[in-house]
Image (cartoon, rainbow, N blue to C red):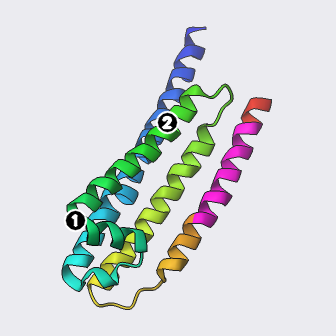
Amino acid sequence: MGKTLKTESKYHSWHNILQGALYFMAFLTFGLGDAITCSWLIEQRGIEYEANSIVRFIIYNYSLSSYIELKIIFTLALLSISFLIQRSSYESVYWIINAFLASLIIGGTLAIILNIQVTAYETPFLTPEQVVFIFIISLFILTRIGEEIDERQIQN
């Protein structure tokens, strides 16, 4: 009996470490990384090089620091909501949440790369529209896979 509990404890610990790392990476890429590289892009090339019209509106009417604050608050809200959904769910949504976090990491990483390429006067390998499309598609595909994994774990 004691041996089973140790195995279960390691299993849950491993899952917690993985999910904690995903939350951290989602915050670093989608939140901080995108906000910082966007700021760098705007400082180096000008506001007209920012593809997102909402971001341009915020920066133009408020300030660059207001945008960074809003981006971080928005990212923390997304992460908090996903955490609260998982905590309050009666069924397993572990892999759905991980898929959501992975999608944020993908979108954030692509946005960072795009911002750096434009700032460095390089030709971007993707357009902003393609980055958004990849993010949305990854969100749908990965969360569907996560949902399937969660459903199979409930059945077992």
**Alpha carbon of mark 2 to alpha carbon of mark 1: how far?**
30 Å
Residue 69 pos. (x, y %): 27, 54
Q: Residue furthest right?
A: 155
Residue 63 pos. (x, y %): 22, 65
Q: Residue at coordinates 49% horizontally, 39% vertically from top-left?
A: 81
Question: Within 10 angstroms of label 1, few (less than 14), some, or many (20 or more) residues?
Answer: few
Secondary structure at numbered mark 2: helix
Query: Quadrant location of residue 92?
Result: top right
| Quadrant location, the C terminus | top right
Left or right for 108, reference 33: right
144 in magenta: yes
Q: Residue at coordinates 53% horizontally, 78% vertically from top-left?
A: 129
Range of magenta residues: 136-151
Residue 137 pos. (x, y %): 63, 66
In the image, residue 119 sits, relative to residue 3, either above or below, namely below
Secondary structure at numbered mark 1: loop
The reply to whether dot 2 and dot 1 touch (C-beta < 8 Å) is no
In the image, residue 77 sits, relative to residue 154, either above or below, namely below
**For residue 78, which numbered disc appears in the image?**
none
22, 51: nearer the viewer: 51
Label 1 sits on residue:
63
In the image, residue 13 sits, relative to residue 41, either above or below, namely above
Label 2 sits on residue:
83
